[in-house]
Amino acid sequence: MPTALRSKSFIALALLPALLLFIVFVIVPVFWSAYYGLFEWKGFGATKFVGLGNYREILQDHIFWRALRNNLILVASAIVGQIPIALLLALVLLKNTFFTRIIRSAVFMPMVLSTVVVGLIWGYIYHPQFGLVNTVLEAVGLGSWTRPWLSDIHVNMLAITIPINWSNIGPYMVIFIAALQNISPEIDDAAKMDGAHKWKKLLHVTLPMIWSTVVVTLVLCISGSLKAFDHVMVMTHGGPAQSTELLATYMYNNTFRVYRYGYGSAVSTIIMIISALLIGINYILTRKKAD
């Protein structure tokens, strides 16, 4: 047997267990959930086939559209906030020194913490009476800016995006550092010899070299923002008046609080479809950029 064929056979055999686990625990539940979305079901007892009734009800529910809008706000804030900041930190902390290792660990630390802990910490930071944000604003003479950050429907979604972005910058920074370290030093030296300054080198050399990594992080940002759940449940429970409701909390509330498992399954299917559409749009736009 040729060496290349043996190598491919070994790789396929090594990947087979992971592929089987992925099919059983990811692919099958997705189709199973889509199937139950066609039924009216309370999680126990008999099911009643309603066809696309659950989907029609979802699309007619204004809370669903509010949750979708809030999720799109999270997606936009993640793309604008997490990716650029993570890339900037990766460029600044690229050199492997004692100081940069400490800063990297500090930036990555929020990812290690439980999302519940992060939500509790930021809940106290935003507390209207003794929270850090209002205390600092009053100390610098901006007392008129103080407000109940998580209760004010005009700013609470913006307030929620900050801890979510803060806790997710670290992993993207590590990904970008790994990508930057894979760029050959010879390419960097050639760019310097051609007179490329820092910004020109970043735009015309560095970014094109790591563009595939940028695309991957964008996909992770989109999918991660659409399944955001823990921070909101801890800080606001989707309130007040569903002003911070997300698609995941909307699905959770309908599935486990009012026991509409069929309806919740339909919501999860719609989340998957929306995620696939946004990732597809991202692929089209980034492919054009790459070309």
Image: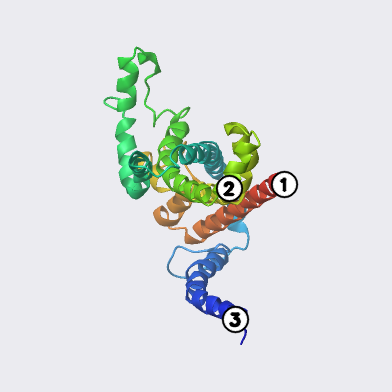
Q: In front: 286, or 137?
A: 286
Residue 123 place in picture, x, y as percent: 33, 35
Look at label 3 and name its amino acid: Thr
Q: CA distance from mark 2 to mark 3?
A: 32 Å
Q: Residues within 10 Å of mark 3 (few under 14, many from 20)?
A: few
Q: CA distance from mark 1 to mark 3?
A: 37 Å
Q: Earlier in the sequence, mark 2 or mark 1?
A: 2
Position of 130 with respect to 48 (left or right) is left
- Residue underneath mark 3: 3
Residue 254 place in picture, x, y as percent: 46, 53
- Residue underneath mark 2: 186
Q: Secondary structure at mark 1?
A: helix
Look at label 2 and name its amino acid: Glu
Camera-nearest label, 2 or 1: 2
Q: CA distance from mark 2 to mark 1?
A: 28 Å
Q: Secondary structure at mark 2?
A: helix
Q: In front: 173, or 132?
A: 173
Residue for point 52% across, 47% down: 180
- Residue underneath mark 1: 288
Position of 181 with respect to 205 (left or right) is left
Camera-nearest label, 1 or 3: 3
Q: Earlier in the sequence, mark 2 or mark 3?
A: 3
Residue at far bottom of view: 1
